[in-house]
Amino acid sequence: MARITAGVTTSHVPAIGAAFDRGEEKSDYWAPLFEGYEWSKKWISEEAPDVVVLVYNDHASAFSLEMIPTFAIGCADTFAVADEGFGARPVPDVVGHPELACHMAQSLILDEFDMTVINQMDVDHGLTVPLSLMFGKVDAWPVKVIPIAVNVVQYPPPTGERCFKLGEAIRRAVESYEEDLNVQVWGTGGMSHQLQGPRAGLINQPFDHAFLENMNNNPQALRSITHLEYLREAGSEGIELVMWLIMRGALGERCAELHRFYHVPASNTAVGHLILEAPKSEGPA
Ligand code: DHB
Ligand code: FE
């Protein structure tokens, strides 16, 4: 049986990708940020997951105002790295797991989550920056990736509660797949940031710290945060945090926090990073 063994959350700031691609990880500005992922890189090389279900948002790279699915699942063999205006990042293409992804699509849709099925898609910094942070420089990503794209760009995004429940359904989907696979779920984006309007540059450290704390110890408190609260407290792009709740919903009740990192700022964003271990013996959600 496939099992969800752990969850990872991390911000996805594009400037992190640019710094990484230019080899600036040790510069004065970037070193404190990249140091926060050293433990994580060692941990994941020991965990060696087979598949990452990577929850992220597209930033008008694969989708546009013409078409924006609320929830989409990538079922392709491979996903090319998107050109976001400066050429594609020099990182490997992302290899999918179409068999598990198609099984998940069926399970999720029959479980009343109407996923959009994507058979061809380029993936942008929302997905590739988390991979670079966790795996460093590689010739090929050492894991298969099932992208789950969430609309947090165009109003109305899904609620945090809906996202949490999608996480629970992802767990049921993964745990009903027969092959023995070590699966992680990642929730990316966040933390507080606002890129536009009069409040551009907003960062709310007390809100972020409370969010990090509650992810493991009191996720119930996070489920009811409204769009208006995200907007007011975490800024317009802070809404990306609903994607963390998909990861949390997939992990089950009693997790162990293995690693926590918080750094301000990276570009315009408060960077938060968590690694949670799933309970070893809990049954399906
Ligand atoms: C920044 C952060 C984001 O989440 C994003 O998608 C684009 C830019 C930033 O901090 O610059
Ligand atoms: Fe973003």
Image (cartoon, rainbow, N blue to C red):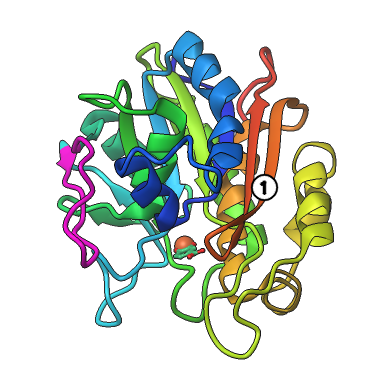
Q: Secondary structure at mark 1?
A: strand
Q: Is residue 9 left or right of residue 226?
A: left
Please state the horizontal and vertical placement of residue 133, each as a whole percent of the image. 45, 35
How many circles with numbers are drawn on the protein?
A: 1
Whether residue 106 appears in this view of the structure is no
Please state the horizontal and vertical placement of residue 246, each as a whole percent of the image. 57, 48
- Residue 253, compared with residue 66, is above or below; it is above
Q: Within the image, what quadrant is residue 106 found in?
A: top left
Q: Within the image, what quadrant is residue 92 found in?
A: top left
Please state the horizontal and vertical placement of residue 15, each as a whole percent of the image. 42, 56
- Residue 61, compared with residue 50, is above or below; it is below
Q: Is residue 2 left or right of residue 257?
A: left
Is residue 87 within the magenta segment? yes
Seen from the viewer's position, the closer of residues 228 and 107 is 228
- Residue 38, compared with residue 102, is above or below; it is above
Seen from the viewer's position, the closer of residues 245 and 264 is 264
The residues colored magenta run 78-93
Is residue 201 within the magenta segment? no
Callout 1: 10 Å neighbours few (<14), some, many (20+)? Answer: some
- List the single residue furthest toward the front: 28
- List the single residue furthest toward the bottom: 198
The quarter of the picture where the N terminus appears is top left
What's under tag 1, amino acid-wise?
His
The residue at the point 36 percent across, 66 percent down is: 59
Please state the horizontal and vertical placement of residue 192, each as a whole percent of the image. 66, 63
Dominant SS in magenta: loop
The quarter of the picture where the C terminus appears is top right
The residue at the point 19 percent across, 59 percent down is: 83
Whether residue 1 appears in this view of the structure is yes
The residue at the point 55 percent across, 48 percent down is: 29
The residue at the point 60 percent across, 67 percent down is: 239
> On the image, numbered disc 1 is attached to which residue?
263
